[in-house]
Image: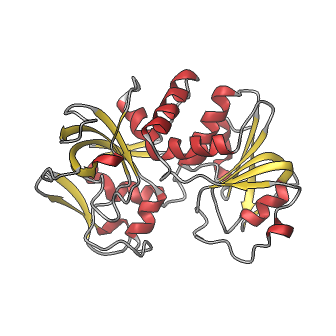
């Protein structure tokens, strides 16, 4: 099989495309043919050597859509279409940046869907994360929402999820690059706000805020939340992992609420619920760019560039 390996931390050019043996079946694990996967910012952090538990060489990739090839698991059978995400995939053991992968049975989820492959591949990590945040934010009709990190894959997924069920709800986005404003508004945003040095250049306030920039900007987000509003922090696009110098009494302003969602909180029931929501409300699943496995360097370079926009997938 073909696989993309990282032997040492570095930039997008550290990937090495190799021919390797297809993994062999072992007890408690199944062999999966990878049909495609999305590229995620956490994989960029790992490639850069910023995931302390990861050792190289490693095949990255924390998600995939695939088919069961070999298995001993009673809930699986060869030929089934499956989704797998998280569970130390691509970190403690080799992940999805390959034509085949060996995965623990407990994190292989056989799903029922009629979505075309490229749309299904765009869903697992990105739309699942957005859907979890959508539920924790308790989005309802009439809410005004800010998506902080508007051009990111999760940000655009959240926009799609909200507008599909609540087309009259106003959804604003923030961006560090206002040259993306027209493109973002074409995607459905009602307005784009400049995020300058992690400070929103507006006096607007919102019922709900999806905080994807993370610890580097979350305190400023509380300056823009309405009474009884909710902020969901589930991204770290700002490059900071932890929130320091945070006083809950003073910083949780306007009797507001702080929640989060972690895509590692996954089950077949929750994944299928997300897929059913996409089908029921005819959510438009946007795929910005599609790469091949041997173009993984170009894919990583793109997602790190100023031109990066939306969900990037690889079809094997």
Is residue 131 placed above or below 169 in the rendered structure?
Answer: below
In percent of the image, x 50 and y 60: which residue is there? 305
Q: Is residue 41 left or right of residue 164?
A: left
Q: Is residue 10 left or right of residue 316?
A: right
Q: Is residue 143 left or right of residue 306?
A: right
Q: Quadrant of residue 60?
A: bottom left
Which one is nearer the viewer's eye here, 184 or 144?
144
Where's residue 153, x and y in %?
Answer: 53, 47
In percent of the image, x 64 and y 41: which residue is there? 134
Taking the image as drawn, is residue 205 in sight?
A: no
Is residue 157 placed above or below 296 in the rendered structure?
Answer: above
In percent of the image, x 61 and y 41: which residue is there? 158
Q: How has the structure been colored for display? A: secondary structure
Q: For the C terminus, which image quadrant?
A: top left
Taking the image as drawn, is residue 5 in sight?
A: yes
Where's residue 130, x and y in %?
Answer: 58, 44
In percent of the image, x 74 and y 77: which residue is there? 245
**What is the number of callouts on the image?**
0
Which one is nearer the viewer's eye here, 105 or 243?
105
Q: Quadrant of residue 248?
A: bottom right
Which one is nearer the viewer's eye here, 216 or 138?
138
Where's residue 91, x and y in %?
Answer: 35, 64
Which one is nearer the viewer's eye here, 14 or 107?
107
Where's residue 44, x and y in %?
Answer: 43, 63
């Amino acid at each position: 099989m073909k696989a993309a390996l990282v032997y040492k931390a570095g930039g997008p050019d550290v990937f090495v495309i190799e021919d390797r043996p297809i993994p062999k079946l072992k007890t408690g694990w199944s062999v999966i043919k990878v049909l495609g996967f999305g590229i995620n910012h956490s994989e960029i952090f790992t490639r850069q050597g910023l995931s302390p538990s990861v050792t190289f060489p490693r095949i990255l990739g924390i998600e995939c859509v695939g088919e069961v090839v070999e298995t001993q698991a009673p809930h699986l059978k060869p030929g089934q279409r499956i989704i797998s995400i998280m569970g130390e995939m691509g970190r403690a053991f080799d992940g999805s940046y390959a034509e085949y992968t060996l995965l623990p049975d407990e994190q292989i989820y056989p799903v029922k869907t009629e979505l075309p492959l490229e749309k299904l591949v765009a869903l697992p990590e990105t739309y699942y994360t957005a859907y979890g945040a959508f539920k924790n934010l308790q989005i309802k009709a009439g809410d005004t929402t800010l998506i902080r990190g508007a051009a990111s894959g999760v940000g655009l997924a959240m926009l799609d999820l909200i507008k599909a069920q609540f087309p009259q709800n106003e959804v604003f986005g923030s961006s560090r690059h206002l040259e993306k404003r027209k493109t973002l508004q074409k995607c459905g945003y009602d307005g784009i706000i400049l995020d300058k040095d992690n400070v929103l250049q507006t006096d607007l306030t919102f019922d709900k805020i999806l905080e994807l920039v993370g610890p580097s900007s979350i305190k400023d987000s509380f300056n823009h939340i309405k009474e009884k509003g909710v902020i969901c922090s589930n991204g770290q696009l700002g490059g900071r992992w932890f929130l320091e110098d945070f006083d809950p009494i003073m910083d949780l302003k306007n009797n507001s609420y702080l929640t989060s969602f972690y895509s590692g909180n996954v089950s077949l029931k929750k994944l299928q619920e997300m897929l059913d929501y996409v089908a029921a409300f005819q959510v438009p699943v946007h795929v910005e760019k599609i790469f091949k496995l041997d173009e993984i360097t170009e894919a990583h370079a793109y997602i790190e560039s100023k031109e990066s926009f939306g969900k990037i997938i690889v079809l094997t």
